Amino acid sequence: MVKISPSILSANFFNLEEDIRWVEQNNADWLHVDVMDGRFVPHITIGSQVVDAICSRSDLFLDVHLMIVEPDKHILDFYNAGADLITVHAEATNHLHRLLHRIKELGIKAGVALNPATSVKELEYVWDLLDLVLVMSVNPGYAGQKFIPAVIPKIKEISSIVAESKRNIELEVDGGINSTTAPEVVKAGASVLVMGSAIFNKKEEGIETIKKVKKLKKR
């Protein structure tokens, strides 16, 4: 079954606990936390203190996506805050292997995110350290962007590599995912879908979207 990881980037930050409770009650599997620093991406969002607060009130698996420069300086903070999975961008570090190894040494899951224009070749020497690959289907930094169809071949390529290697690696897709784009993404091989606007903007429709997407089957 496809996992749903609602992105709190699209939640109501004034009532964040209420929105998190709502996705818990409506069968979300994970909670996606977008950490932006205003340098790697244009916007600034939240830090480890908010992750710590979320962890104290929610039992959902915390899927922490670091869209920041020098992520190596902040890994321990997010681990201590309660992250279950830390995903770093291949574009944000010169020492990807070392950084992933450090995350794994902490005893949590490690992921790598690839921007739309970033090649799968960036993963060539780190497959054995990965628990997740995150394919960005928009250019990171803003909620509510339109899905970029050109990433579908990349999703298929990663899915094939994972299947052939028989590694236990989740394939997550983030950006413009809704009830229209989800079927194609899942068909291409995605196992985890990050959804923000499609869930939080109109909650009645969001409930139906979650139900519909969770019924999709991978190829």
Image (cartoon, rainbow, N blue to C red):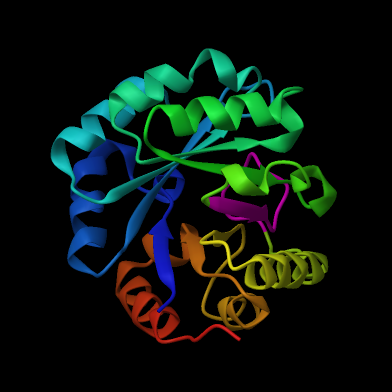
* Residue sitting farthest toward the top: 73
Residue located at (39% from left, 27% from top): 106
Is the residue 70 above or below the residue 197 in the image?
above
Image check: 120 left or right of 177? right
- Can I make out residue 41 in this image? no
Q: Please tell me which residue is depicted at 47% across the width and 22% down the height of the picture.
A: 75
Q: 216 left or right of 190?
A: left
Q: Quadrant of the C terminus?
A: bottom right
- Residue 43 picture location, percent across and down: 60, 29
Identified at 56% across, 49% down, the residue is 143
Estimate the x, y position of residue 34 in percent, counting from the top left.
49, 39
User: Can you say whether 55 is above or below 99 in the image?
Assistant: below
Placement of the N terminus among the 4 image quadrants? bottom left
User: Residue at 44% across / 28% down in the picture?
Assistant: 105
Name which quarter of the figure residue 154 lies in.
Answer: bottom right
Q: Nearer the viewer, residue 66 or 109?
A: 109
Nearest the viewer among 184 and 200 is 184
26 vs 72, nearest the viewer: 72
**Would residue 16 be counted in the magenta stretch?**
no
Q: Nearer the viewer, residue 50 or 124?
A: 124
Magenta region, main secondary structure: loop
Horizontal and vertical percent position of residue 15: 23, 42
Q: Position of residue 178 (x, y in %)?
A: 53, 72
Q: For residue 62, what is the image quadrant?
A: top left
Q: Which residues are magenta?
A: 132-145
